[in-house]
Image: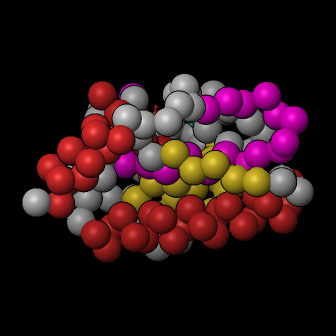
Amino acid sequence: MSECIFCGIVGGEIPSRKVLETDSCLAFLDIFPANRGHTLVIPKRHVLDIHEADADTYADVAATAKKVADILQSKLNSEGTTIFQMSREAGWQTVFHLHMHVIPRWSNDGLHKPWDIAPGNEAELDQVLQQITK
Ligand code: 5GP
Ligand code: ZN
């Protein structure tokens, strides 16, 4: 059996609840859902994260996530959608096979943003922009 849980799901060694399958991607329900219908979208071919993925693979996963978001919205009558993609341990990734979380949202669902909302320091914003773009 593959050491990667999601490769095990692609290979059928680990069962999953499939929402959508394309030639290159698989979408299945998350077993620890943040909300009703929380779905993960993965490329079938193992790749670690956003930095290791080539642009076409990432675009394919994003396009499949868009299809899944539309399916969930129409079938579950969700009022909004939140998409997360965690990369690497510092980015909160826990399963090291690229995936996007597609989370149907309702205004009263009780989920909250994982960071405090506060205005940035103007000088720090200028400094980081300079570092990013120079
Ligand atoms: P991450 O924290 O890496 O962004 O997300 C990994 C997600 O995979 C978690 O939300 C977790 O609930 C989900 N997950 C972990 N193991 C399994 C599994 O065996 N099956 C399914 N369907 N989801 C899993
Ligand atoms: Zn894998």
Nearest the camera: 33 or 115? Answer: 115
- Is the magenta region chiefly helix, strand or loop? loop
Across and down, in percent, residue 28 comes to: 61, 49
Span colored in magenta: 93-113
Q: In this view, does 129 lie to the left or right of 16?
A: left
Quadrant in which the C terminus is drawn? bottom left
Nearest the camera: 125 or 16? Answer: 125
Residue 103, placed above or below residue 43 = above
Residue at point 28%, 40% (across, down) = 123
Name of the residue lying farthest toward the front:
123
Q: Is residue 110 left or right of residue 56?
A: right
Image quadrant assignment for residue 88: top left
* Residue 47 in sight here: no
Residue at point 56%, 62% (across, down) = 65
* Residue 44 in sight here: yes
Nearest the camera: 29 or 67? Answer: 67
Q: In this view, does 94 lie to the left or right of 107?
A: left
